[in-house]
Amino acid sequence: MGKSLNLVQQIQDVYANDCQLGMVLLDLEGQLVTRPSGNNQWVRMIEEVNPLLHDWMKRMTETGVVDLFPGAKIVLSPVSVLGEIRYFIWAGFLIEEESRTIFYDYLEGNADQCDLWKVRLEDIPSVTNETKKHVVEKLKGLSEALSKILDDEPKQMKQQQRINSVYEISELMSSEQTHTLSRVLQEFMKVDQEIDFVGFAQKTDNGDGVVLHFDGPSDHSPLIGARFSVGEGFLGQVMASGLSGYWKKIARDPRGTIFIKNDIKLRSLVCYPVQNEETLLGVLFAGSCRKDDIDSFTLDTGKIIANLLQVFLLHQSTTHTYHQQLQKLNALMEISQLITRTQDVKKIAFMLVDMSVNIMQVKFSAVTLFDEAQSEEVRIVSRGLTKDQSEKYGKQLLQQFQKWKVDREDFKKMMPMYQTIEGRGSVIECPMYSQKLHGVLSVALDPKSEEQEAFLYSLATIGAIAINQSKQSQNGMRESVTHLHDAMGFWDPQSHAFTQKLRDWVLLFSVHLNLPDSEMKIMEYACLLSPYPVDLIVRTLPQEEPLHQMLRDFAFLKEYKANSDPNQPLLGVGSQILFIVFDYLKGEERIYGHPCIQETLTRDFRSFILKEQIVDQKVSVKEEHSLPVGKLSNRENEVLLLLVQGLNNKQIATHLFISEHTVKNHITNIFQKLDVKDRAGVIAYYYKYKTKN
């Protein structure tokens, strides 16, 4: 269970205290996974009844009350991980008053247990049917919360394993071992367990193609030495055209004859040309015999390996460029490690620009970042361009991007291209594509060089993967916060409701102060997680230092005493705003001063409260659900208002009696119509609209 165990233990302790029962998490063998919570003496009796529990756990698929002995009951609740039951929550014991006599009679017939159980029986409170129903519902909620937490860890481990494989491949490429290519193919297979084979083919002197390297399961006949004509089949097609190919659902495709002849039942295949200028050096291919498709991470990794293979093969065949190529390869490895650890998209852009300028020794480099949610704007980071030149070039790329959006499939086919910039000469533009087009890496390259093109294209591909990973990580952060906040709703509904109100007021005041969206997002998370201990948040979300600091400052303000040390720490604006609103809501909507809070912020909040009261008087005659926002439909307005209140997709679906899929479609439409990227953007837009109107 790893890093999640501490969080699971914390939540279990809270539920055990709430239910006033002994509680523990068991694996499918009946072994304790967590430390017993609550009434420990009853939990320790698990060893005595383990065979009975093991039999029940084999049969149970949902939360229920189990008669462990005549008159004595426990509650078992299954916990699923990735759709499979892996654990059970044990809670006990429950005895109804009228059942005590039955249990005493049972014990009289089991003399070896009679004295021991009679002593313990006196400590068990009587329960009613309502109490049992309450406990069952509580444990259902606990199971759902633990499932969400435990689902995340295997996914993160799989992603980390894939990244480690990419690192290993990069390191192999910089080695001088004779079997480097075979090792690279083996590492490529580790990226995705659904990949069954990888290989590399080259042209022979007589113009045919031949498979030189192949790695796959032992039950596959070796493909090494198999020959094919250029233009024939999948491999021949890529070798003839010099273009990448990806094919799905090809179990009966005649172009896979070379695989069928060697007892390889092909279902999906991807091929990458490895070429130098107009000379094809070879074809890298990988495929699956079990799946009809290959995931996007594996496809992107193949692009990196193909480009690295190109550099590697050129290094072998061109000895006079050895030192230069090795330097670039090491640099590529270093930047891939640095970039993939960076969560800030702007920092990734700066790193790409600096690396390309320093390694390539060029006069100009730029990264232009596109954002589909802000289709009329681009962000450009450059070195070697004046402000006017940078703005002009950014507009030029924005116009190209708007044309490219017409046919999104063109993104996947885009290769580096040359443009001419006034005063800067020939510039190579490398698309940064990973699942979608994130931007363009532009570098002054005159004269043109195929070797430098390959390096820059690899650099752009790594940057695109890092940016895509960063955006997914941000989405994962929101999901983690949502899970923790949902869990709070089970054990402390009052705090859950208060944090939603706190979040709404903090965001509304932040919009009033025109704070940046990035700061507002951290403040939103801090509001929702404020009841949790700071140490718990640090362990659960270890990478989110700005959130940690804001919660520490907030905790300091709450615990501050007048006679405290006069040398107070420097507090961030976000934590001060959080405390001002918290103090206002907890103090029956009165505004108090605080020696650690900036007086200007307190004055601004008083002004804001007065303005809000006036606005409320103006709009109080209207129904809030009729608030017109953009061009939203009536149903989209309903979804918007529930979203602003903090409900997740499942809760919105239940409230409106529609499916979660329909809710997701409505939210996507809302994002597009309001021109925002995420839920925080929707909330900010809503409050800005409410304030202005």
Image (tube, helix red, strand yellow):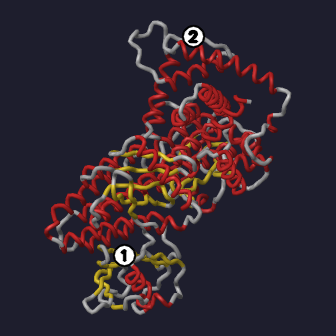
Quadrant position of residue 425: bottom left
Label 2 residue SS: loop
Label 1 residue SS: strand
- Judge the density around disc 1: few (<14), some (14-19), many (≥20) Cα neighbours within 10 Å: many
Q: Amino acid at mark 2?
A: Gly
Considering depth in this image, is 107 or 88 the residue closer to the camera? 88
Q: Amino acid at mark 1?
A: Pro
- Judge the density around disc 2: few (<14), some (14-19), many (≥20) Cα neighbours within 10 Å: few
**Residue positioned 14% across, 70% down in the render:** 319
Residue 210, above or below 283:
below
Relative placement, left or right, of 427 versus 645 is left
Residue 649, above or below 406:
above
Residue farthest front in this picture:
422
Percent x, y of residue 258:
41, 90
**Residue labelled with disc 2:** 593
**Residue labelled with disc 1:** 273
